[in-house]
Amino acid sequence: MSTQADRPLLIVLTGPTGIGKSALALTLAQKIGCSIVSADSRQVYKQIPIGTAAPSPADLAAVPHYFVGCRDVWEAYSAADYETDVLKLLPLLFREKTKQLLCGGSMMYVDAVCSGIDFIPSIPQELRSALWRRFETEGVEPLAEELFRVDPEYLKRIDPRNHKRIIHALEVFHASGKPYSSFHTHKSVKRPFDTLKICLTMEREQLYRRINQRVDLMMTQGLEEEARAVWPYRSLNALNTLGYKEMFAYFDGQITLDEAVDLIRRNSRHYARKQLAWWRRDPEMNFVKIREDASAMKIIEELLEAQSPT
């Protein structure tokens, strides 16, 4: 991280699902006296607070939060939309406090704010829904075959079973008439603020235990009922996510409730590994290990002290 005197600072607090980012962010924001900008691509949706572990009403009252429960699941909202909205908000927040906090585990959202993402054309909801319906009725193979015809370069770079990436690439192709790979420049954009990137880590066994406990808590809080309420919108991209796709499979009679809960646990652990692998590729990331002695906050405070101009 490079810093300049008098430039505002965006503290980025990220890490794997279930590690306790939100609780630590709340404490840090109260110490600094700043707001929390959520970087969670699913917490933006107001209909699914339980399955996304959205901040509680008490947390929202204690510290101003942004991009939590502000959209409906049927509204299309992309990382590019998020980048635009956050970059409009940050100058206003920096006027109040020159240190602000971005917290969340959605990799693309964090990268969009810190480095910028390549321009991607907007996708009509009708097109998105049509492609998802094709996936549900035909499976991933016909979609992968179509992508091979229109954008073989991109298909070479991804897992041919990754339906999310295949569908998104086809969305872009049909919306723009250009291959998805043609939009990838991988150029980092300079921002008018500095960033301090912090990724929380934890012993694997401890993290997996926390994830399992969190899934159990979600079930107690009413995840099944919440998922059933949005089941009619199951084809929407917003709901093709952890906790909901497994519940939808249960509602469809494909698996039992116990199997759905076990799948949520397993898929959450897999997602945590994916998040950590992503952040380890970032040379600017500072890794802070969570221990029982609350040393993580002390280390974060030392990182903040080290970057402050003398």
Image (tube, rainbow, N blue to C red):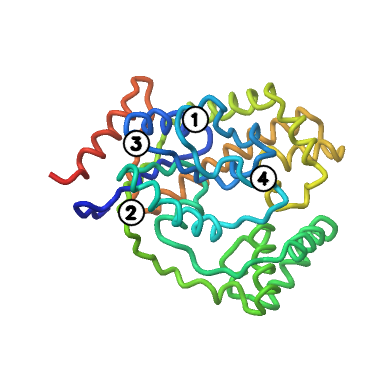
In depth, the one of 146 and 77 nearer the eye is 77
Is 132 placed above or below 225 here? below
Q: How many marks?
A: 4
- Circle number at residue 6: none
Q: Secondary structure at mark 4?
A: loop
Q: Kindly identify which numbered label has been placed on residue 283.
A: 2
Residue 25: image x %, image y %? Answer: 42, 33
Q: Earlier in the sequence, mark 2 or mark 3?
A: 2
The residue wearing badge 3 is 288
Residue 226 rendering spot, x and y as whole percentages: 74, 33
The image shows residue 10, relative to residue 64, as above or below, that is: below
Q: Residues within 10 Å of mark 3 (few under 14, many from 20)?
A: some
Residue 129 versus residue 211 in the image, above or below: below
The Cα–Cα distance between marks 1 and 2, rounded to whole angstroms, is: 23 Å
Q: Which residue is mark 1?
A: 207
Q: Amino acid at mark 3?
A: Val
What whole-number distance in Å separates the C-alpha atoms at marks 2 and 3? 14 Å
